[in-house]
Amino acid sequence: MAWLSQPVVRLLDEALVGELTVIGAGGQPITHPLIPLYDGERILMHSSTLFSRKLEHIKRNPHVSVALTDPIALRGLPDRATIQGTARIIEDDPHSQWERLILDLWRKKEPVIDAFLRMRVALPLFFERAVIEITPQRCLYWVDGDTSRTPVVTTAPGERAA
Amino acid sequence: MGRSPAPRVEARQLDKLAGYPFVVVAWVDDAGYPMSVATDFSIDAERGVVTLRQPAGEAAAIPTDRAVSVLGSHIRPTPGQGYDERRYQQLWGTAADAGEGSVVVTPTRAWGWDETEVPFFEYSERSVPQSRRYLAELSREKGRIIRPRLSAGWLFLRTTRLPFLSATAVPVLLGIAVAARGGTFDLGLALLTVIGAALAHLAINVSNDIFDTLSGADAANVTPTPFSGGSRVLLYDLLTLRQLIALDLALLGGAAAIGLALVWATGSATLLWIGIAGIALGIGYTAPPVKLVYRGLGEIGVAIGFGPIMLLGAYVVQTGSLSWEAVVASIPVAILVALILYVNEIPDRVGDAAAGKGTLPVRLPQGVVTGVYLAAAGLAFAVVVVGVIARVLPVATLLALLAAPLVWQVYGGIRRYYAQPYALMPVMGTNIKVHLYVGLLLLAGYGVAIVATPAP
């Protein structure tokens, strides 16, 4: 169910990079800058098998957060948001499943990816990928990105309160 | 009064973080979810600490009783493309209340990536073991084999390194042209020669890959390029060793069958010995116990194999005998094909050294390597000139000199980018063109000579 506010959705739609934080084997937070995609309900991130430690961490503990913080990566938008949620790894076919799930959304933000995809023979492992499907559960939103002010906290229907 | 704690991470790691305009601090909240928030920060390099402004509100307050990560991240958007200039720096530690609305983190670990320091392709290559481990575990989880894939055509191209066939086409066609200038040409035999030589070349490429992977040479090379570092199909798990050996045997079998057919058709024992020498040189390039490339003899082996052996073999198929003209014509081609290998070995030299491969760029200092390139390339062109003066080669083969300026480009490139594998890629491409263009221009010269020669 789509419940994120429009300003947060706009951040997700514009973001070239967001910070995905996962929980490591020792319980420590580990943050990865990744391109976030949004299908209107879930946040979709993805990872090559080359850089798949984050996938292993998520499989061990699916709790994650996605922060949208950098006005440059947000193409001028000053607001900030952090979305907490639960992730699921989609990896039945790392060779082509991701293309069906996210390629259209990915190329809208990063058109150059089509040129790289044509060179798949040169980068075969880079294009063996898993999709990280995140169901948002809680969102903190800072107008104008000012984190010295208390964020607006919203939760998904039926989820824990702030 | 106690002394300040010693920095737990290197000062340069803190310095790198200092360059970012803000940081994202992350921790695991009481509900067991990661929480992350952007905030301002300052670095005290002497104390080895990061001071963070405490964000407002209970939900975003940085806790002081657990591990936190502090991340600086940067990209540069490139409209219509995506983004570049990727870099990030991450520190881990425990936060402590520093009063006045701030917390201080003493980092104990640091990690980061800056693509200007470690290029993306190298970063990817260093991560290949992680990919293999992940896919092996995924296969166990799913109860079926999950491996990287490429379409059959691309996989064949990558596995055999098909584009390098120009190294075979040039000497074979030139051998046929030298024979034709002497008045001997059989189209059927010429086609069989081209196909057989191509199969032999591809078989040798695959053999070398097998031995380079088994010896650890390919794994030790973390800066492969499209021109160097092998096909890596075994390393990437695109093919199994058994599949690669089967392909190699099929290619070798095809080459041997055509070679024997040509020996039978021409009745030439010389051709048989040339073929045996060629296959032995190709396999012995990396295969034990010969391992020419490990002994600093790889370049000479390639020069002989893809120079005189290919060219004389093609010539003998047509004429049944050897000639000085064919030998002389093979020398510039031999030198220039060896220089393809020689320049391609420059970015591989660290991995080659680690694997015990004593190529010339491993054995020689940079100044000597670049100097030898220029001298050898100059010698290739000098042989053409001397061959013409001595009336061994036709005058029109002087057309080959048109490619000489490319040598200067390559020489400048290897001097400038000697230590930058990826910047060397266009230089390696130009160097391949030197061999190809010289070969084509020699062929053109022979074409002119054949047309200009009055029919008997």
Image: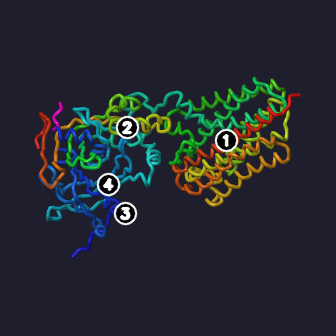
Mark 2 — on which chain does it sit? A
Q: Which residue is mark 2?
A: A111
**Residue A61, numbered label:** none
**Residue B90, numbered label:** 4
Q: Is residue B274 in sight in this rendering?
A: no
For mark 4, give the secondary structure.
strand
Q: Nearer the viewer, mark 3 or mark 2?
A: 2
Q: Which residue is mark 3?
A: B12
Residue A38, position as x, y percentages in the image: 26, 35
Label 4 in the same subunit as label 2: no
Q: Residues within 10 Å of mark 1 (few under 14, many from 20)?
A: many
Which residue is painted at 64% across and 35% down in the image? B165
Q: Residues within 10 Å of mark 2 (few under 14, many from 20)?
A: some
Amino acid type at image mark 1: Tyr
Part of the protein shown in magenta: A1-5
Q: Which residue is mark 1?
A: B437
State how far apart marks 3 and 2 are (Cα).
35 Å
Q: Is residue A146 left or right of residue B327?
A: left
For mark 3, give the secondary structure.
helix
Amino acid type at image mark 2: Pro
Mark 1 — on which chain does it sit? B
Label 3 in the same subunit as label 4: yes
Which residue is painted at 83% across and 48% down in the image? B389
Residue B62, position as x, y percentages in the image: 18, 55
Q: Is residue B51 left or right of residue B405?
A: left
Q: Compared to B239, does B409 lie above or below?
A: below
State how far apart marks 4 and 2 are (Cα).
28 Å
